[in-house]
Amino acid sequence: MKIKFFKITTIVFFTMTSNLGLFAKDITLLNVSYDPTRELYAEYNKLFSSYWKSKTGDEVRVNQSHGGSGKQARSVIDGLEADIVTLALAYDIDIIASKGLISRDWLKSLPNNSTPYTSTIVFVVRKGNPKNIKDWDDLVKSKISVITPNPKTSGGARWNYLAAWAFAQKKFNNDTNKVQDFIKTLYKSVPVLDSGARGSSNTFAQNGIGDVLIAWENESFLILEEFGKDKYEVVIPSLSILAEPPVAIVEKNADKHGNLETA
């Protein structure tokens, strides 16, 4: 009886694993993301593909599209058939949802308000901090050149804007006129408004433009890693902001592609 039982369970096991391979699918997902997540998803997609294959037998390929968060949201609305969006601001996903591509209650569909991680905003300066930049106040001094992306197209730029606004509110005791003047002076010091955070990083670190870069914390670490800690350093301002980049399934597209379960 023991021998028969072993034979039966062995046959069942090999039948199940054979069927898993027999019905396996090739799946392609498109993740439309904001600018500085290239390295993150290059690693994460490999892990997800391995996990999904072990679970279902399916081969999953995740294609990436990167750019300024607001610009990426507009691309999805205009027809870029994302299965998933991983953007810098909930506002950008809300706009897509308003067009019927995503459920309006998307924020509650995943844990932590659909926010898998958080970040903050810091400064990157040249080694030795030659302009002695330590806080937001220093960015509005004369002859200080500031690099930050365009808030009209970049989610990271909006977080930068909000962090600067919060500092000015505290400094000027919520005097709206003074806060607005502070922000205007700050943006007058920006020689280049790139469309996304990665473009601003390249403008600052690669092209040598500007005295200070306002950046995502993870982007600042990448600059130090790629260009050298002997060339750049990170300054943490006295006040910053908790940035919460969310994710969502673009149900209309994922359903059309047959990817709802995988997405």
Image (tube, rainbow, N blue to C red):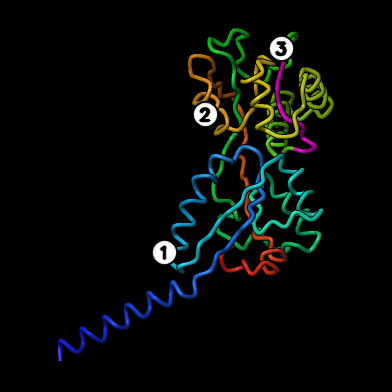
Residue located beneath label 3 in the image: 144
* Labels 3, 2: front one: 2
By secondary structure, the bulk of the magenta-drawn segment is best described as loop
Q: Earlier in the sequence, mark 3 or mark 2?
A: 3
Q: Earlier in the sequence, mark 2 or mark 1?
A: 1
Screen quadrant of the N terminus: bottom left
As for residue 152 lying within the magenta part, the answer is yes
What is the C-alpha distance between the residues marked 2 and 1?
33 Å
User: Considering only vertical position in the picture, is 130 above or below 216?
Assistant: above
Screen quadrant of the C terminus: bottom right
User: Is disc 1 placed on a helix, strand or loop?
Assistant: helix
Q: Judge left or right: residue 139 versus residue 115.
A: right
The amino acid type found where label 3 is placed reads Ile
User: Considering only vertical position in the picture, is 19 above or below 106?
Assistant: below
The image shows residue 261 at horizontal and vertical percentages of 57, 68
Q: Earlier in the sequence, mark 1 or mark 3?
A: 1
> Mark number for residue 221?
2
What is the C-alpha distance between the residues marked 3 and 2?
23 Å
Quadrant in the rendering for residue 142: top right
* Labels 1, 3: front one: 1
- Highlighted magenta segment, given as a residue range: 144-153
- Residue positioned 70% across, 40% down in the render: 67
Disc 3 + disc 2, Cβ < 8 Å: no
Residue located beneath label 1 in the image: 54
Disc 1 + disc 3, Cβ < 8 Å: no
